[in-house]
Amino acid sequence: MRKTKAAAALVTASALVLGSMSMGTAVFAEAGGSDLNIMLETPVESLDPQQATDGTSFEVIADYTDGLMQMDADGKAVEALAESYEISEDGLTYTFHLRDASWSNGDPVTANDFVYAWQRAVDPDIASEYAYMLSDIGQIVNAAEIISGEKDKSELGVTAVDDKTLEVKLNVPVSYFLSLMYFPTYYPVNQAFVEEVGDTFGTSPETVLSNGAFVLDTYEPAATAIHLTKNEDYWDAERVQLSGLNYQVIQDSQQALMSYQSGDLDTTLVNGEQVDQVKDDPEFQTIGAGYLWYVSPNMDGVPELANLNIRLAMSNAINRVSITEDVLKDGSIPTYTAVPLQFATGPDGSDYSADQTKYSDVCADDAEKAAEYWAAGLEELGISELTLDMVVDADDAPQKVAQVLKEQWETTLPGLTVNLVIEPKKNRVEDMQNGDFQLGLTRWGPDYADPMTYLGMWITGNSNNYGFWSNEEYDSIIAECTTGDLCTDAEGRWARLYDAEKIVMDEAVIYPLYTQANAEMLSSSVTGIEFHPVALNRVYKNAVKAE
Amino acid sequence: MKNYVLKRLVTSVFTLLAILLVLFVLMQLMPGSPFNDEKLNDSQREALYAKYGLDDPVVVQFGRYVGNMLHGDLGVSYKISKNTPISQMLETRLPVSLFIGGFAVSIGAVVGLILGLIAALKHDTILDSLATIISVIGVSVPSYVFALALSYSLGFKLQWFPMLYNLKDSFNSSVLPSISLSMFTMASIARFTRSEMLEVLGSDYMLLAESKGISGFSLIFRHALRNALIPIVTVLAPLVVDLMTGSLVVEKIFAIPGVGSLLVNAIQSNDYNVVISLSFIYSALYILIMLVVDILYGVIDPRIRLAKKGD
């Protein structure tokens, strides 16, 4: 009798296990053909184009959604849902004519889909983190007032003239406005659909609509696996060669590389330690990621750092080449300008920061000059020793870089001691924004393909001007280039931007370190993936995978 | 017994409420906020706080949370998967962790018992030493080392099992993570079984049972193992909760969409509702398992049942 009871308990326990087993099993249709298998480092945070803020989410949203414009292989804005457009002579009015395209529920894509989406982006109730893309960056009429609650969202300067015509009014001419149109915050959403699914919008394949190259068919919130299938009804379907996209989130880099080597992945990221192992492989490559890593000295809170010679000494004491070649090894480029390389192309078609020697008199890997500045600075301050703390993210790469910086500074600049304060990124950002730091190792990614995405940061009072630096001349140049006469004069504006950058460099407002690159493996059977440092990091519309 | 269970259930409810309050206070003490993107300005951050009611006093937030929870509403995620109801996230993730954990506990308990039994019955032989060595390795080597080793050998080299979790093949892809997770349980159970069995086997009543002519299978399983089980169940219970609630590192290595990785991501990004909901569920599970264990004691050992009746 007793034995049967015990046996019954065992049976119940195993039934529980079996029960949960069937719950854990989900059946998905096996996708055939040539799907591209892609590794993601982080899960998607949001599939709502107006609420997403991270690169992973943007990439996936753009796989199944088109905006007015799209990026070509060089990152230039070319027509997507807009068949054509006109810009008024004063540069303040953009009129887009939409092509015939439809959502995956059969509804046509109309001008109202854009009006509704853009109103969502600035709606204080939605509280989109990227609302500033429409106000500060896009300069759309009334966007700023709507965000601050002074005006109703219906007053936003965008109107649907008819189903196929969208008119946008700007406060001032914005030279890069067309390139904003491929940024996901500007993507359309179908009003009737969004209102129907309500709060569940973007949380499953059933609660999103596609108008793009692929259709989402496997997704759950914070999913580790995401699948999209080619959209046969896409307006440009002929161009799409892949049968689908198969994303796998892998947070362990060793597993990712093994999955690539066993053929489960067509492309994967490689971390600094793995680079040595794979760098001779022809499938290894490095891709510019646009991020500028730099050290921000707190000039307002630390009297010693208010001394220009001390700052110049620290900037020149850094051996950037050694950081990228000996530590990172992922293709990152040593950077001696306040605007990083390879993301902003000027009126003449050249990279804004191609010339890295522009400011070599104030920023170089020059230990000798650094020592001179240092001696001068110490004398001015009347001190012989200096101890500084540097806040650093508790992530792998920043910690390694910080260790090397500490060593380089302490070796080159006698009397300097640098203590590293390692903390989670969220705390580090908070400390820096509150001015509660001495030196900070930080980074900034470009939001749009114009140097202003960096230079705009150092105006007086900007929340990312961590050093609380303030310079009247600088502020006026930036104002001239954003809202002044120069808005319509591309060449003149470009030249003035260099003037602004020179002030930042002369004053050593930041110590630029390197432009980040990502080391990755890409299968030789895959061609045509377009990599971009801005907005959408990878675009697959033209990708081809050989069988 | 019924009264006892009822009393325990009522106490559990109050315990859980207290846990919830402590969690709320801890959340307030956590540095940072869910909205700490460098690109946010102060007014946007204020708007977000207002949107989610995070600018209200803690007491108000707590009251509202408990109220919502009674309706089955665990709130939405602020960061990991913006505006997604937590219940929807748990619906897909909890079963995955429960299954892998359950699988691991089953393997660990069964193999551990067998190892322990062999060690005890073949006391002081080569088999005993072998079982002891296995247990020492199991207890001292962390599960992620097993995970990496298994993934490299059975996954990458031999390709017997998938290296990464695959929803289409959830059983096969659960094998490697489950084995990695089961090692600690297996080793602990083996050690306890061995020492308890040795003690029981050396006791007077076993001598009596043997002299009464009871032999073989019945002697070991009915008389010896059953008495040895009480302490084993006691150590097994917390291990069950540990494993069922998902392992952070093993989930990360095998890319398992479970709740362990979710909790860590949530803590790192200050996703308050996710942290609170998961911690709360862990606590509830823990309390429930402990209750089940107490009831199991009665099933296994009549003396405990009788003592409870006397209360």
Image (cartoon, coloured by chain):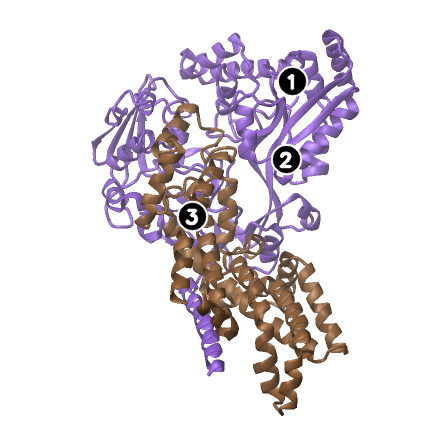
Q: Tell me if residue A376 comes above or below residue A421 in the rendering.
A: above
Please report, as a chain letter, where disc 1 is located.
A
Q: Position of residue B226 (x, y in %)?
A: 57, 77
Tell which subunit mark 2 falls on: A
- Residue A398 numbered mark, or none: 2
Q: Position of residue A128 (x, y in %)?
A: 37, 32
**Dot 1 corresponds to which residue?**
A359
| Mark 3 nearby-residue class (10 Å; few <14, some 14–19, many ≥20) | many
**Foreground disc of the pair 3, 2:** 3
Mark 1 or 2: the one toward you: 2
At 53% from the left edge and 20% from the top edge, which residue is drawn?
Answer: A465
Q: Is residue A131 left or right of residue B233?
A: left
- Residue neighbourhood size for the residue with mark 2, other residues' Cα within 10 Å, grouped as few (<14), some (14–19), many (≥20): some
Can you give x and y, in whole percent of width and height, for residue B141 in the image? 68, 59
Amino acid tagged 1 = Tyr
Q: Which chain is brown?
A: B
Query: Does residue B182 appear anywhere in the picture?
Result: yes
Horizontal relation, residue A426 to residue B76: left or right: right
Determine the residue positioned at 46% across, 45% down. Answer: B275
Q: Secondary structure at mark 3?
A: helix
Q: Residue drawn 61% across and 85% down?
A: B219
